[in-house]
Amino acid sequence: MKHTDPHGHVTPGGPAWTYDLGSAVVRKCSVGEMDNNVYLVTCTATGARLLIDAADDPDRIQRLMEEDPEGSGSTLEQVLTTHSHWDHHRALAAVVGRTGATTLAGAADAADLPVRVDRRLRDGDTVRVGHLVLDVIHLRGHTPGSVAVALSTAADRTTSLLFTGDSLFPGGPGKTATPADFTSLMDDLEQRVFAAFSDDALVLPGHGDNSTLGAERPSLGQWRERGW
């Protein structure tokens, strides 16, 4: 199944969006009153799967896994939480209880999650999902331990998916509490994301539609100037 709309618009209660890369398939659905995105990444060679942000509605997440023919029913190896804000982990305990999945989160946010975190992630770490490798990017500012993960299908990173949580959206960075946090987040986005990946990298945020780095790059100076 190939994706038909790169914008990836989904709504709570609506159908999932699917992006087929050949070696990987990504499924996206929206849950809860805050329109949180949940992502399921599947290695097509092995059926191994990673869930990103068990945000709410464990039954919908269960159906998302069951809709995935490349995987195996409700089997889930890992669940990664991009940051510690409550709306991104309301279903985490239920999903882990049902699946026994290994839990991953940024080291500085791990203590604030409702489950024990098996693996505390730091910048430069990698997460393996079957034959897939995802790079961990620590983005300090929205929360102390916010992380993004990058799935690249080529060694030169010319085709990448960036799961950015609430650190990068179409139109700007995520919300920050202080000017220092904003500067920290912008510095990390510019140095660790925009300088590291090409314009066609697809940005998959924690809420709302997708974007690309190329669409957002011209606005970096404007974001700095406005301060949010």
Image (cartoon, grey):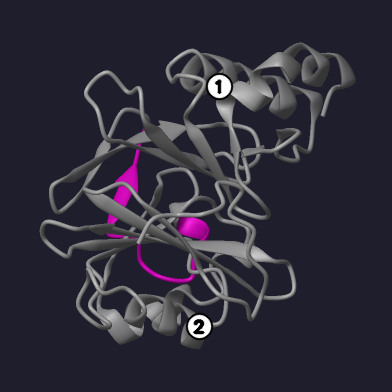
Q: Specify whether residue 114 is painted magenta.
A: yes
202 over 2 or under it: above or below: above
Residue at point 53% right, 18% down?
194
Between circles 1 and 2, the one closer to the viewer is: 2
Residue 156 position, x and y percent, is: 27, 18
Q: Which residue is mark 2?
A: 60
Q: Which residue is mark 1?
A: 188
Q: Quadrant of residue 78?
A: bottom left
Q: CA distance from mark 1 to mark 2?
A: 33 Å
63 left or right of 56 in image: left
Residue 113 position, x and y percent, is: 49, 63
How crowded is the residue under tag 1: few (<14 C-alpha within 10 Å), some, or many (20+)?
A: some
Q: Which of these two is toward me, 206 or 83?
A: 206
Does the rendering let one see residue 4? yes
How crowded is the residue under tag 2: few (<14 C-alpha within 10 Å), some, or many (20+)?
A: some
212 over 48 or under it: above or below: above
